[in-house]
């Protein structure tokens, strides 16, 4: 190569380093997410699993150095702490997948905009990087939930706020629907059935109520109804029941009958990212000759009533009505689509009416254009999150109504103190047909993030109070992790629950490099090098790095 070419190459490299340095210093900075405290929004070190039984793909957190429970120690595998199984979070599956030899991927690589707050105030629900108040040398990333001058409390999984030192009514903090759809957590995906269980008599999660004319297509995972006779005059329900297989049910599926007929359960704050079983736990169960212990279920003790139904609706005629229903305690929130008029209406039966009485309906909000048309499928979503009912058809918001506790509220909400679960909360989602012919497919149920009221530090006052100074110099913010059971955040800090303004670094902007996806060899690639267990040459190894791989374009996205 000629001298001038060497010089051009050297100059290009120097300029690239200078530009990268300037970009880092003045505009944005790259970070690697170390832990799972912000899952499912952001992944720390994790394994990427496709369930052997139902085919649902999910991420499960892995513990790596410097965590005290790391499964890797000084370059070797810690036998007791290594992950043995990852439990599928799809409610009707719950299969414990063996992951002893599955690769541990690094956390998401993200870009952080370092100076957005020089030009505008931080907003509630921003994902923020900041210096931890306890150890100012450590960068943390959490979701901003409380602003200067507010009192904050956590009630039944939601964030409530009011102005500091006032008697003003508490208000629920609502997430925008775009942000909500990015951080909601899967409960059940009907397109991924656990067929081995179903073949042994396990009930389908979705089914028509007795005496209805709903027909199931178990292969296409869809349902159809074309009401005839007197069925055209009555409301016929297709309903979801929250069945949860146990380890002993999976043991029975290997050849014997089910131990007992399952009963629907309440939906709890289980996080799929945390559903892992260590080798030590697995071996203890084996010694006791018991099924694998799913200890995370005992930790997830909070009933979650904020739910979302998404599905594909295919109206086959222009007569009748379609109803979507989400149950929350004493309330049965509904979205009613009239196929004849093309209009929709939110409503709920009065709590004062006898069970089964459909005549006393409370209308919620104004009628709206549904956007449904006959002869083609529509993507429909009905949500009840943060005391807000939202209807989306083909990705467009058709109606959104806030429910509030204030005396003058046009649409009163149920107080979290008065909310009580009932039998229908174990079968909390339904699709009804009143004289309407339709097909339903792609049924999925999600839940909201549930923030736990963790008070491990024994605070005498359950409220969080945030300073608002006149010159902004002493302003304080409250930060929580999306993975509430595994997040060290404002709830748990010893000295102060607040993050001062001067410790804010910037706003998380995008995931620019999630872990790469190995391919070939059953989707695992071929390990270049591996971790081994010290003293046990026969134990399964864990790949350090595998080839070939492709970029994971689906998770290269904006951070909400």
Image (cartoon, rainbow, N blue to C red):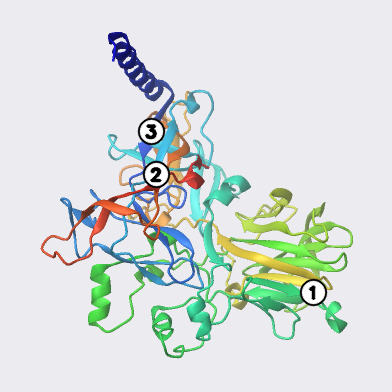
Q: Is residue 287 above or below residue 414?
A: below
Q: Nearer the viewer, mark 1 or mark 2?
A: 2
Residue corresponding to mark 3: 30
Mark 1 to mark 2: distance in Å? 49 Å
- Looking at this rendering, what residue extends furthest in the top direction? 4
Quarter of the view holding residue 332:
bottom right
Q: Earlier in the sequence, mark 3 or mark 2?
A: 3
User: What crowding class fits label 1: few (fewer than 14 Cα within 10 Å), some (14-19), or many (20 or more)?
Assistant: few
User: What crowding class fits label 3: few (fewer than 14 Cα within 10 Å), some (14-19), or many (20 or more)?
Assistant: some
Can residue 37 be seen from the camera position used here?
yes
Mark 3 to mark 1: distance in Å? 56 Å
Would you say the residues marked 3 and 1 are in contact, meaning their CB atoms lie under 8 Å apart? no
Residue corresponding to mark 1: 358
Mark 1 residue element: loop
Q: Earlier in the sequence, mark 1 or mark 2?
A: 2
Query: Residue, x 41% and y 86% (percent of image)?
Result: 252
Mark 3 residue element: strand
Residue corresponding to mark 2: 108
Would you say the residues marked 1 and 2 are in contact, meaning their CB atoms lie under 8 Å apart? no
Q: Is residue 404 above or below residue 51?
A: above
Foreground of the two, 475 or 300 = 300
Residue 25 in the image, given as x and y percentages of width and height: 37, 22
| Lateral position of residue 435 relative to residue 556, left or right | right
């Amino acid at each position: 190569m000629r001298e001038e070419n060497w010089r051009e190459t050297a100059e290009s490299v120097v300029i690239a380093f200078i530009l990268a340095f300037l970009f880092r210093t003045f505009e944005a900075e790259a970070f690697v997410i170390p832990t799972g405290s912000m899952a499912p929004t952001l992944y720390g070190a994790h394994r990427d699993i496709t369930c052997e039984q139902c085919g649902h793909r999910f991420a499960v957190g892995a513990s790596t150095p410097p965590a005290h429970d790391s499964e890797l120690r000084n370059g070797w595998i810690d036998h007791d702490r290594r992950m043995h199984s990852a439990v599928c979070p799809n409610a009707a599956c719950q299969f414990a997948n063996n992951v002893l030899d599955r690769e541990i991927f690094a956390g998401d690589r993200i870009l952080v905009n370092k100076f957005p707050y020089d030009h505008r105030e931080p907003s509630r629900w921003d994902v923020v990087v900041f210096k931890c108040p306890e150890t100012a040398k450590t960068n943390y990333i959490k979701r901003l939930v409380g602003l200067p001058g507010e009192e904050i409390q956590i009630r039944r999984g939601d964030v409530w706020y009011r102005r500091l030192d006032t008697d003003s009514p508490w208000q629920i903090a609502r997430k925008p629907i775009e942000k909500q759809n990015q951080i909601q957590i899967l409960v059940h995906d009907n397109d991924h059935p656990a067929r081995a269980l179903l073949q042994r008599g396990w009930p389908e999660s979705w089914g028509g109520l007795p005496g209805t004319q709903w027909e199931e297509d178990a292969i296409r995972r869809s349902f159809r109804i074309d009401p005839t006779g007197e069925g055209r005059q009555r409301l016929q329900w297709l309903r979801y029941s929250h069945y949860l297989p146990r380890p002993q049910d999976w043991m029975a599926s290997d050849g014997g009958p089910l131990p007992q007929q399952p009963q629907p359960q309440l939906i709890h704050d289980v996080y799929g990212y945390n559903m892992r079983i260590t080798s030590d736990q697995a071996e203890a169960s084996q010694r006791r000759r018991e099924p694998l212990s799913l200890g995370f279920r005992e930790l997830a003790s909070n009933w979650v009533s904020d739910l979302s139904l998404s599905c594909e609706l295919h109206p086959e005629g222009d007569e009748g009505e379609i109803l979507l229903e989400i149950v929350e305690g004493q309330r049965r929130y509904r979205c009613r689509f009239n196929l004849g008029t093309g209009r929709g209406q939110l409503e709920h039966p009065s709590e004062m009416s006898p069970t089964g009485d459909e005549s006393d309906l409370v209308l919620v909000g104004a009628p709206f254009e549904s956007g449904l048309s006959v002869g083609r499928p529509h993507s429909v979503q009905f949500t009840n999150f943060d005391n807000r009912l939202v209807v989306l058809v083909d990705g467009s918001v058709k109606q959104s109504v806030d429910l509030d506790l204030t005396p003058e509220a046009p649409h009163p909400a149920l107080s979290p103190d008065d909310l009580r679960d009932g039998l229908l909360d174990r079968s909390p989602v339904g699709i009804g047909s009143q004289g309407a012919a339709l097909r339903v497919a792609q049924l999925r149920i999600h839940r909201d993030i549930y923030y736990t009221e963790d008070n491990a530090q024994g605070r005498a006052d359950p409220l969080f109070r945030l300073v608002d100074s006149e010159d902004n110099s002493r302003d304080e913010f409250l930060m929580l992790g999306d993975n509430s059971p595994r997040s060290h955040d404002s709830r748990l800090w010893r000295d102060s629950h607040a993050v001062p303004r001067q410790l804010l670094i910037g706003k998380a902007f995008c995931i620019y490099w999630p872990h790469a996806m190995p391919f070939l060899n059953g989707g695992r690639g071929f390990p270049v090098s591996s971790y081994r267990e010290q003293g046990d040459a026969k134990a399964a190894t864990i790949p350090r790095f595998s080839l070939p791989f492709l970029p994971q374009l689906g998770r290269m996205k904006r951070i909400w």
